[in-house]
Amino acid sequence: MIDDLPSGLRARHLVEDDHPRVLSVLDAWWGGLKGEAGATERALLLPRLYFQHFTTTSFLVERDGGEIAAFLVGFLSQTEPDTAYVHFVGVDPVLHGQGTGQALYRSFFALARSHGRRHVRCITSPENSASRAFHTRLGFTASAVVPDYDGPRLDRVVFAIDLSADPAATP
Amino acid sequence: MIDDLPSGLRARHLVEDDHPRVLSVLDAWWGGLKGEAGATERALLLPRLYFQHFTTTSFLVERDGGEIAAFLVGFLSQTEPDTAYVHFVGVDPVLHGQGTGQALYRSFFALARSHGRRHVRCITSPENSASRAFHTRLGFTASAVVPDYDGPRLDRVVFAIDLSADPAATP
């Protein structure tokens, strides 16, 4: 399903039972950021519905032993027939810099393209400079910081890529 | 678009600019529950993406003067071709008991059916007894409380309705 993963990793589509497993690694990967409130915040961003209704465009990467290594939750826009959206991506920090996140995005691009989607959009928090650098390397164009984009005090940077125009988006 | 609304109300599909307007009425309708943390929690449950990518199955109800009276955010399941999902519904408390929520659901049922969807699912918090009674009246079947359904301490009741089997689901 994803060819260019580091060795010892394999990918599949998400299933509903992955939901509590993904939430639990999130807390570890985010270093328990903001404690119990942070765990709730992450759970609210990633409700079970994504693991029920958007599995066909979402991926889980596991180690040979079954331990979660990375995931990508995305969907095809229902409103915009030429757009796909990446909602949430996580990679085990010990695997950062090895191409796992890039492989996930390239697989999502290929899947989006197979559904006739030309544009992929996603967002990140302004303070997440690693995410901003990562998306720029992948060929995304970044917006300026949009204050209150997702609600009061939830500023965001918006990324967009045109899969038909950007050679960097070719798998 | 929705025929059986109380007089003085009219419905249309959501647009992106509705996002901050809906979030701001939410705080008022929920009585500022849990203060700033509560406002953030509601915003995280209703990110802008729903107002961009799932507008075609989501509704806003406004008063003649343009003030928001109610909304329903729903989508067609990408994984299950016979399922549609209602994610978030809000009705101005002063309008409760006048049929606005029921009209929104019936319109969503009709729209789901026109897309070949037979099942509609949604969830609520166990302590929201008004929501549980409302969904039961509409013909939904309720599950027992599912602990940690949406993450740690996020217990939920799951509702399901079979549009082809339940006469109460007929518009």
Image (spheres, coloured by chain):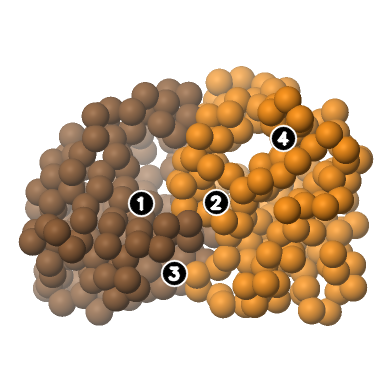
Chain colours: A brown, B orange
Report in which chain the residue with disc 2 lies. Answer: B
User: Where is residue A14 shown, x and y percent of the image?
Assistant: 41, 70
* Numbered tag placed on residue A88 in the rendering: 1
Of circles 2 and 3, which is in front? 2
Q: Residues within 10 Å of mark 3 (few under 14, many from 20)?
A: many
Give amino acid for label 2: Thr
**Residue A65 seen by the camera:** no
Determine whether the residue tagged by mark 1 lies in a helix, strand or loop.
strand
Question: What amino acid is labelled 3 in the image?
Answer: Thr
As measured in the structure, the alpha-carbon distance from the residue carrying label 3 to the one carrying label 4 is 34 Å
Residue at point 75%, 58% (across, down)? B107
The subunit carrying tag 1 is A
**Are marks 2 and 3 in one subunit?**
no
On the image, which quarter does residue A148 sit in? Answer: top left
Kindly report the distance in space between the C-alpha atoms of the residues bearing marks 4 and 1.
32 Å
| Label drawn at residue A55 | 3
Tell me the residue that label 4 is attached to.
B62
Q: Amino acid at mark 4?
A: Glu
- Circles 3 and 1: CB atoms closer than 8 Å: no
Q: Picture coordinates of residue B101 (x, y %)?
A: 80, 47
Note whether residue B109 is visible.
yes
